[in-house]
Image (cartoon, helix red, strand yellow):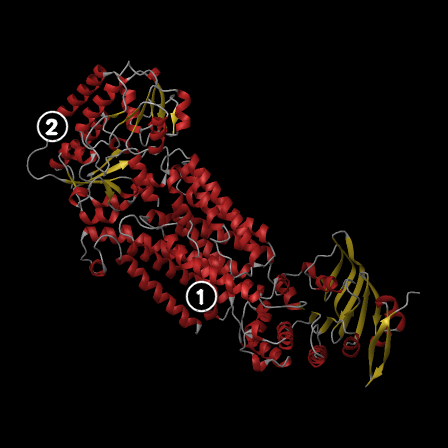
Amino acid sequence: MTRLSARGIRHAFQGREVLAGVDFDLSGGEVVGLIGPNGAGKTTLMRVLAGLIDPGAGEVAFDGSPIAGLATEARARAISYLAQAGAAQWAVTVETLVGLGRLPHLGPFRGPGPADRDAVDRALAACDVKMIRDRPVNRLSGGERARVMLARALAVEAPVLLADEPVAGLDPAHAIDVMAVLGARAKAGAAIVVVVHDLTIAARHCDRLVLMQDGRIAADGRPGAVLSESNLAHVYGIRALTGTAEGAPYVIPLSRANPT
Amino acid sequence: MNRAALTALLVITVAVLFVASLAVGPAAVGIESLGKFLTGRAGEAERIIIVEVRLPRALLAVLIGGALGLAGAVLQGYLRNPLAEPGLIGVSASGAFGAVLTLYTGIASAFALALPLGGILGAAMGVVAVQILAGRDTSAFTLILSGIAVTSFAGALTALALNLAPSPFAALEIVFWMMGSLADRSLDHVALAAPFIALGAGILLTTGRALDALTLGEDTAATLGVDGTSLRRRIIAGTALAIGAATAVAGAIGFVGLVVPHLLRPLTGHRPAALLVTSALGGAALTLAADIIVRVLSAGAEIKLGVVTALIGAPFFLWLVLSARRRLA
Amino acid sequence: MMNGAATTLLRNVALAAGAALVATLILFTGQARAEKPRRIASINLCTDQIAMLLVPRERIVSLSFLAADPASSAMATEAKGFHLNRGRVEEILPLSPDIILAGPYAARAAVGLLRRLGHRVFELPIGESLADVARHIRAVAHVLGEEHRGEAVLSDFEARLRAIPAPPPGSRPVAALYAPNGITSGAKSLPQSVMDAAGFDNLAAHRGIAGVGRLGIEDIVAARPDALILARLSVEHPSLAARSLEHPALEAAVPKGAVIAVPHHIWACAIPQIVTGVEALANLRGRLAAGGAQ
């Protein structure tokens, strides 16, 4: 079942067309990896899907209704967004920060209740940061901060989760942890889009990959099919060693492809 | 510290300072006179001094200090910058200019509400100017530079207006507008400012959750349901109402909005929403204390309230700048 | 400080000063008096007004800007149309005056420079009592060669003064003078002399204030004087100073009907118009004695 769908998305920024006609569907239960070279339009597409940008043309719909027409709170409960390189301005505790994910669920005069506290607990546990819940967020390591930010996004418990580079700068173990959390979330029914640069991480942890190039979708499908030799050469301009290990693909970039 | 305990402690501090403010002044009317007043045994002179002279002062210190503390906490949360403060970013100076325009042209003599309204309009222009100048840039540097620009410009316009005013006394009154004072304010001033300050504070208090969400940046806050446009409007309106009305009756009092949220932030778990009510209380306490110091220190001509708050606040500000620099280095 | 600065201003306009340099009335840098000065420039509020009383308009080339300010000058209307100066040498020199009339405080540097440039400068001392009215008028009349006109002005003044009924013997009511920003005048001052003549004791003098001093709202309320004299500033030129007289506690400090507002400019100079102040105060004292105020 399709949760989020984008049709004919075009968007220009300072005279340059960043998105040049994108159609995209996202269903519950799948982790979709959004990949592509720098400047392909991944982050802009994520921001359009999250409702942060009104695209110049086209429409994003959640469960069939355009998100532009949704009330801000309703949209906030439907779509959770994890910004790239997110940081906290103030030194609040981990638990307080994760609790911010519950804001869309609070009424104007109603504070967090037991349901909200349970959701925060689940998010803390899922990201394995329960034991540091009382620590101020300015005293976290890079891996801890990434997991805490993810926990904040999970605490919304939205049917759609958009995560922009949640594993950037993480060591392999932490990167695998974060992707595993997303996978578990999808198994529980959520629809997830994740922007990833590491092609092996993308290939092994996503159910489907969407490859972007120059504001368009160049390929969309199973990881093994999207990461073909030809796509890697034409879109990324590289030669790579590809293969399968333990039932999932891997990609090792070797050199720049010779222009043909 | 537990937030309820902190709030209770601040309320008690404000109450004690409020009583002290009623018991300090040049006339020999002290705490025992206050006791006589409360039991209905005070003489006419004592009654007038307590009710007509010192009560307006104490009430204005609470209202204006509260407005400054609250606006400081809101602006710091909104601009995500610990150096934001109505005085430093030029909102107070622009409010003073607005009030000066209505007072010295005689509009305020014909229509009393023109004074706070002039202050509110001026302050609104100040907030908008800083938002345009500093905008989304959360660096302290840009904010301080914008603040200096707005403050200097509003100060120059104020000086110009005062020099062009027909009254020969006007030019000497710039110190009041630049430094602020509560000396010899009456209940009329309280009545003029209180409704606007209360309205502004009420609007600012609605921003707590949005400010919490802004901890994560504007984008994430927007995806958490924060309506950026509505938030911006509320902050401009609330700050302009509270600070504009405060400045119109007491001049520009600096640093309260800087010092108070800073001291209280660690005690409230750094959460912007938790800082709002506590900063209002802290601002009231600091302003009451400073206004008591003013009266204790000066026998004849009172020093201006803003002199005391600046003497406390400016070294604090320097320390903040130094620690910010250390963090960057 | 606003209040300190206001004090300075009041001094500048020579309101009954504290610093008591009296002695010689005429510090006159005279060569031998030739003829009547034809081009008179004044840079002091008190000499402005005395000059207007003594000579026809066409002989005055400039007055100080305060002469035209209704808050400071008893003759603001008469001063309309004159060239107004702010006591700066460059404003005075192009007028090539025969004589420059100055006060004891304002524009000291200007006075010194004008003398160095060979100008004739007359300095009028501070007025400290009603008796100074005659002394000042005669001194200025003398340098302007208008002795007869001076005597005529004085005889009017003295007749009005004599017409005021003498205060009854016995205890005198205490009055507090409250000028903008809590300024007051104590012993050895023009207001003291006015209060004396009208039959009031001066609260400030009781407090040991001599010359210009400060009397706050709380001080006045605590002292509970019999009458309160407000040195009112004109409303058409608003200022915080003007509004400082509107504090409700002041009105409440004295019995009903015992507040009198006397224009601020009445207290500024020892000039004949000061008699209106004596009349107003004597009138209030009469009403208080008759039990008109509770």
Q: Position of residue C123 (x, y in %)?
A: 27, 27
Which residue is found at the position 17% from the left and 33% from the top?
A: C193
- Residue A168, quarter of picture: bottom right
Instruction: Specify the label residue C165 is tagged with.
Output: 2
| Position above or below: B229 against A112 | above
SS category of the residue bearing label 2: loop
C139 to the left or right of A167: left
The reply to whether label 1 and label 2 mark residues of one chain is: no
- Read off the chain for label 2: C
| Circle 1 residue | B263
Say how many tags the image has: 2
Let me know if residue B205 appears in the view. Answer: no
Closer-to-camera residue (B194/C228): C228
Closer-to-camera residue (C88/B73): C88
SS category of the residue bearing label 1: helix
| Position above or below: B166 against C256 | above
Closer-to-camera residue (B152/C171): B152
B246 to the left or right of A108: left
A239 to the left or right of A182: right
- Read off the chain for label 1: B
- Residue A119, quarter of picture: bottom right
